[in-house]
Amino acid sequence: MKLPVYSDVVEPVQILKQPVYFDFDFAIEPMNTIDPGPDSLQQSENAYLTTSKFDSYDELVKSVREFYYTKGYGISIRGSNPDKYVILQCDRGGSYRDIRGISGKRKKSTSTRLINCPFQIVGKKQGHDGAWMIKIKDLSHNHEPSEDISGHPSFRQLPSESVKTVEEMTKAGIPPRQILSSLRQQTPNLPAISRTIYNVKKKIRRQSLGDRPMIQALFDELQEGGFTYDILHNPEGRISRLFIAHPLSIKLAKHFSNIFVMDCTYKTNKYNMPLLDIIGVSCFNTSFYSGFAFLEKEDEENYAWALRAFKKIIGDGNEPCVIMSDRELALMNAINNVFPATTNLLCVWHIEKNVLANCKKYFGTNEAFDLFMSIWNNVIYSTTEALFESNWGGFESMYEEKKDALDYIKSIWLPWKEKFVAAWTDKYMHLGNRCSSRAEGAHAKLKQYLQVSTGDLRVVKEKICLAVEHEFNEIKVKLSNEKLKLPHDGNVTFFRYLYCHVSQFALKEIHKQYKVAKDGIVFPCTGHYMATMGLPCAHQIKHWQGSTYSLDCIHPQWRIDTLLLNSTNDLHDEGTDRFDDLLNELRLKYQMWPLNKKEDALSLITKLVNQYDTVFEPVIQRPKGRPPKSKKKRGVTSTTRFPSRFELVESSQGRTFIDLNAYPFDTCDLDGPF
């Protein structure tokens, strides 16, 4: 058996019933030996403590812990100054203190391991040679040694290299359980448990804050990271709205500003603030995050504030052609006011699900309702206004006896037909987006990074950075890759000038139309395909047969030859030029002003420079859904969304009764009355 050696003193150990593993390179194996007795143990202990010298603070702490672990005692640090001294005690020393000051009124029945064990030694740094020596204060214990040391928290502490690994993996968004599994792959006998990883993460967060409050740390990081952000706080100084846009998001939003999808998601932060997610569409038909806004509530004023901030970052010349949303009147009104030249389209998927939730109860069988929805879809996808009038007339006459269902559609959806019926929506550049599924997918991806819904604004910002940077790098690599690729399909003269100049997605779409033109066209041209996609339709391609299609006829949305992406923050702030011009003009006028006006100007500028608004964390709002004391309440840390009304309607098939009012709903699916 191998024994630890300290200053040439070999220490006998007590009998152990099973192997004990430590966070160093040896283990005490079970053996049959004679108990050396307390006197012998005390002599060797005194010899080790009084004769050992250590080169550093860390070496002393590690050595003492290893020494006493073999005896069945855990050692913790009572106080220290890494350049002068360290006080070490038994980790059962001290007594429990109720920091709430409400003894006997605890929410949980807990326990303590602290029993005022008197053991204590002091390590001090010597002045003449810098070595560390140990001074004995009390070596007695008021308890028996532990047969299994793994129950002591001090035994489960991670070495410095493992702490660094935890920090790196935490920044990458890896959950604690996976971090622990990875550490155990490297060190099979690692004594750490899940709580160890959580404690290390908490310590890392505390160290990263330093002496700053969380909000100040957040603003410092936003400024250092080149974020564009805006805040609004209430009279008490608490943040009520926060808009943030990553510099990489701004770069993509300016390149691809034709269409954005907007939708709120919930259960992302501990304040229960709705998060408005703004999603863009790249030339590869993939989604990217364009901006985020934490709102106090979902009303027109909050939405308009967020949209004005977003409008500033994309610039006046990049106003979108289309903004896709669900039927949330406050958001629709805000879009109309902030982006008057932009067309706001409604998600047809949400429309169908709302019709399902509100009309299915009027039909006796699933088959009858499926037929109803099929005919309603024919109305939605009418390609001309005349066809819409015809389809709607047939739909209305066919279900004349279903007055309640028709009244719901007439009152809730028909007034907005220009925003979702194909006869009107196919006049705008929506790039094939008829629903807000991109936003739903973006919500789900972001929540995978968040993992829990109890993070503060700084934690959520860090996760947003991970998601944005991932999406940007995916698009950046795809751009470089597609500039080198030649597709096997469509290798004909017609596509000669398009290769490596437009995205592969656009080439595939053009090739589909090329095949239709080659096979013969039997339907009249409506011009909708070119208007919505910015790509040539089969009719236009037919006129170009035998020649090469011009690259200038492709909408800039799909061009990759003119697109340059890099990770550096090279964005040009248009407001900076205006600010510099005003400063130069002020400097010239300042020279001609009288003294009193100069003093007023200096006083005003000094006030602006030194002005600092003290802001605090947002107020924690009441969450959406059932009251917190509900017995059916979900886990408080869950990011899982509440069920929508249509999901409860679908799940109620075959049941005799379901109380819909007892469930919380996702408001995006509550566009009509129950």
Image (spheres, rainbow, N blue to C red):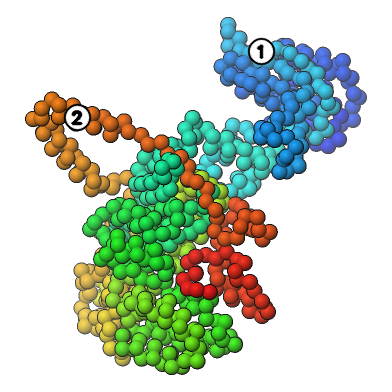
Residue under numbered circle 1: 133
Figure check: 474 above or below 157: below
**Which secondary structure, mark 1?**
strand
**Where is the N terminus found, in terms of image quarters?**
top right
Left or right, residue 564 beside residue 60: left
Instruction: First in sequence, mark 1 or 2: give its number.
Output: 1
Figure check: 26 above or below 270: above
Q: Quadrant of residue 506?
A: bottom left
Q: Looking at this rendering, what residue extends furthest in the front direction?
A: 235
Q: Quadrant of residue 595?
A: top left
Taking the image as drawn, is residue 422 in sight? yes
Tell me where residue 232 appears, x and y as whole percent.
Answer: 38, 46
Residue under numbered circle 2: 600
Tell me where residue 487 appears, x and y as whole percent.
Answer: 35, 69
How many other residues sit within 10 Å of disc 1, few (<14), some (14-19) or many (≥20)? many
At label 1, the amino acid type is Met
At label 2, the amino acid type is Asp
Give the distance between the C-alpha atoms of the residues marked 1 and 2, in whole angstroms. Answer: 65 Å
Which mark is on residue 121?
none
Tell me where residue 424 appears, x and y as whole percent.
Answer: 31, 78
**Residue nearer the viewer, 552 or 594:** 594
Residue shown at the point (57%, 82%) measured from the top left: 361
Residue shown at the point (75%, 40%) measured from the top left: 110
Q: Quadrant of residue 430?
A: bottom left
How many other residues sit within 10 Å of disc 2, few (<14), some (14-19) or many (≥20)? few
